[in-house]
Image (tube, rainbow, N blue to C red):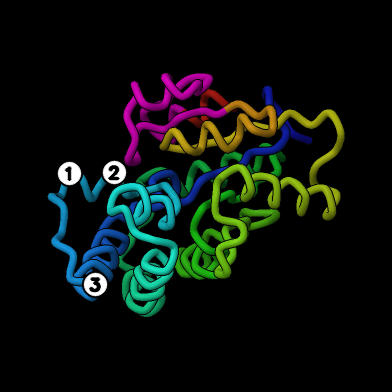
Amino acid sequence: MATGAYDVILLDLDGTLTDSAPGIVNCVRYALDDMGIPHPDDETLRTFLGPPLADTFGRHFGMTDAQIEQAIAKYRERYHDVGLFENSVYDGVPELLRHMSDAGLTLAVATSKPTYSATRILEHFDLAGHFAFIGGSDLAGLRHDKASVVSHTLDELRGRDRLADGSAVVMIGDREHDVHGARAHGIGTIGVLWGYGTEEELLTAGALTVVESPDALARLLS
C-alpha cells in the first residue's frame, strides 16, 4: 500500500536518474561533424540535454525535416553502440528508487529518449526492475514530445492495472519540458536540481516545488 501524497510516480531519465550528458553531447558533435556544421560552445550544448532531438536540431540549427532526420540518424549511429554507456547513475538514485518501491509506490519512466535506449540503460545499471513500465519515444518519431510520452505511459499503466481512477500521480524531472508534458495531462511536477535545469526554469514552467538531492526527494514523498 502506497504511503504519502502520491500513488504513482513518473520519472524522467536524462538528468533525473542518470547523467547522460557526455554521451549525448559527444553524439550531437558527431552528427554535426557529419553535416559540416560547427559545434556550439559547451554551455549551449548543455541546453540540448533533455528536450527531444528533433526540437533541438530544428529550433537551434534551423534544419529542415529532411536534415533533422539525417542528423538524428547520424546521432543514433554512434549513440546505440557507444554514447549510450557514456553515462552514470546519480549518487543517491538507487537508494531513492528502493525507498519508493518499498513504500509501495508504482514507478514508471517517461522519457523523450527512445524506449529501446532507455530500457538498455536502465538494465545496464540494474535499475529496470523498479519500474512497472518504461515509457519513451518511438524510433519512427511519431511519439517524441513529452506530452505524448506521458500519455503513452499512463495508458500502459492503466492497461496493466497499475493506475486506477483517482490515483494521485506526480512527475519527477529536471527540465521545463517535463513540467509542460505532465501538465498537459493535469499532472504536477517536482523538479530536481541535480540535473540539467535550474530552479528558475522549473518554477517558471510551473513545477510544484524543487528538491536539491535524491534524499530530499525521498523525504518529500514519505
Nearest to viewer (mark 3 / mark 2): 3
Question: Is residue 120 one of those drawn in magenta?
Answer: no
Q: Residue at x 61, y 42 (%)?
A: 147
Q: Could you tell me the amino acid type at mark 3? A: Met
Q: Secondary structure at mark 2?
A: loop
**Badge 3, how many Cα within 10 Å: few under 14, some, many 20+?**
few
Q: Name the amino acid type tagged 2.
A: Thr
Q: Earlier in the sequence, mark 3 or mark 1?
A: 3
Pointer 1: residues within 10 angstroms few (<14), some, or many (20+)? Answer: few
Residue 89 on image: x %, y %: 38, 54
Q: Is residue 16 positioned above or below 89 on the image? A: above
In the rendered image of this protein, does residue 118 appear above or below residue 59? below
Q: Residue 36 appears in which quarter of the rendering?
A: bottom left
Q: Which residue is mark 1?
A: 43
Q: Position of residue 201 (x, y in %)?
A: 36, 26
Q: In the rendered image of this protein, does residue 139 appear above or below residue 164?
A: below
Residue at 29 percent of width and 48 percent of height:
60
Residue 168: give x, y in percent of width and height: 73, 28
Is there a contact, CB below 8 Å, between mark 3 and mark 2? no
Magenta-colored stretch includes residue 199: yes
SS label for mark 1: helix
The magenta stretch spans which residues? 189-216
